[in-house]
Amino acid sequence: MKNYVHGYSKRESERLEDQADTLSEILHYDTEFPPGSEVLEAGCGVGAQTIILAKNSPEANITSVDISPESLSSAKNLIENEKIVNVTFKQADIMDLPFEKESFDHIFVCFVLEHLLDPVLALKELKKYLKKGGSITVIEGDHGSCYFHPESKESVNAWKCLIKAQQDLGGDPMIGRRIYPLLEEAGFKNVQVTPRVVYVDKSKPALVDGFIKKTIIAMVEGVKDHAINSGLINRGQWEKGIDDLYKSAQKDGTFFYNFFKGTGIK
Amino acid sequence: MKNYVHGYSKRESERLEDQADTLSEILHYDTEFPPGSEVLEAGCGVGAQTIILAKNSPEANITSVDISPESLSSAKNLIENEKIVNVTFKQADIMDLPFEKESFDHIFVCFVLEHLLDPVLALKELKKYLKKGGSITVIEGDHGSCYFHPESKESVNAWKCLIKAQQDLGGDPMIGRRIYPLLEEAGFKNVQVTPRVVYVDKSKPALVDGFIKKTIIAMVEGVKDHAINSGLINRGQWEKGIDDLYKSAQKDGTFFYNFFKGTGIK
């Protein structure tokens, strides 16, 4: 009966995707670059995605840049500890890169545009360093996509504090839904955007722990001081909000968040 | 290069799923029942899902019930016009079905639980008519999953009027996220829930027209009188809200909505 209830064989991999139990699988199962290709990772931060890129494409030459020397230092340590040899790091500003124009086959930008005041300008700038026919890959979240069960006024407000805090810093935490028009406006061709859904219920314990608790709630807790000090919420409401968020990770809880992955060709 | 940017071959079908261009494909590519099986469609309404069930499982015996004689009459006409012969209609209340206990191999319930005051009680009642080892399939939307670009205060408020209007009728328009705990609470085993994402940008013209305009905005416009007459919104704000919703169907617009499909075994 299972064959009938759960689908045509040609859809089997879609079902597997639904059952992916780590964020890395959901975002990166199709992040792979050919042997010998030159790949620029723009804004590598502390190397969380770098390590996945390097492992998925062990024969590509990856150049990872970030503006922060401290982040780069962490990223280098991470890569060295894993004995990965196909990554070169360079401290640089995305808006003023120290490379030859049209020198990369592929550019990869993950969780970067959300922080920028003018993401289209950044995409246009990156495009200069891409060979004609080369691809760009952009991954971003969308904090407006998040909902959960059970919900309370306080847990929803705690989540809204995260959004407001990121907006206060000049970013757009709801940028995911804009990837398609942003890539088009920057002049990329053949733009394709796919949603990357993280749906969690108790049948997926790795995501309950790794995503709801250690990614999402940890991220919300990171804006606690800003939220309380700037008067977005009072301390009691905040504490109840966090407690209530944890209920989505309990027996009857469910959680939903959506990322977007877009590609375009120069 | 396409092979590398767009994925491993084993994920090809997932990519195809992302590109599904009708709601029916997204919800029903895996709705199929074996030849000779007895299938109960509980709450068939005007037959919108019945026709898909019957075509996907032409050798299953489908019994479709609804409480409304008017809806059943429409459903019958639809099925007869398509010359479909494997559907039997019966006017009946889900809470008091005129069948032998344990007489169905599969039960299918789509866009029904959202309208009920006690969905767990309904699931428990349906379970009586399912053979041991038989399956239930439940599909529901979640109006809290909806977002779009561009957004305005008015378009978001028009959407919230839809939610409020359905809540005023005693239903739960955010029931999608609860399918997993509802099926568990009703005593089904091996519960599996998958999100069914509808993401629309201008690269998917069939969904721009068929989903954003003809499904979503049409549904919102259906509560216009209730929303204005009950003071949820004033006429000017409503008109601007609808105009702004249409912007998500234009050149730079994007739209996101999520359904959930759950299965369980008795």
Image: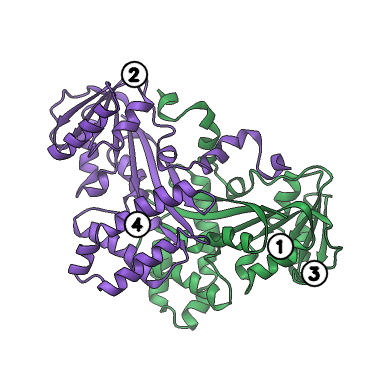
Chain colours: A purple, B green
The disc label shown at residue A217, or none = 4
Q: Quadrant of the C terminus of chain B?
A: bottom right
Task: Check if mark 2 and mark 1 are on a common chain.
Answer: no
Residue behind mark 2: A59
Front of the two marks 2 and 1: 2
Q: Nearer the viewer, residue B236 or B100?
A: B100
Say what amino acid the circle numbered 2 marks.
Answer: Glu
Secondary structure of the residue carrying numbered label 3? loop
Identify the chain of the residue marked 4, using the numbered disc in the image: A
Residue A53: name its quadrant.
top left
Q: Residue at x 51, y 67 (%)?
A: B220
Disc 2 crowd, CA 10 A, few/some/many (<14, 14-19, 20+) = some
Residue B93 lies left or right of residue A179; in this view the side is right
Whether residue A75 is visible here, answered yes or no, is: yes
Classed neighbour count for the residue bearing mark 4: other residues with Cα under 10 Å, few (<14), some (14–19), many (≥20) = some
Where disc 2 sits, the SS reads loop
N-terminal of the pair, mark 3 or mark 1, is: 1
Which-is-in-front pick, marks 4 and 3? 4
Furthest residue toward right: B100
Question: Marks 2 and 1, how far apart in space?
Answer: 57 Å
Amino acid type indicated by mark 1: Val
The amino acid type found where label 3 is placed reads: Ala
- Chain letter behind tag 3: B
Q: Residues within 10 Å of mark 1 (few under 14, many from 20)?
A: many
Q: Return the residue at label 1.
A: B46
| Position of residue B66 measured from the top left corner of the image (x, y, whole percent) | 75, 66
Disc number for residue B92: 3
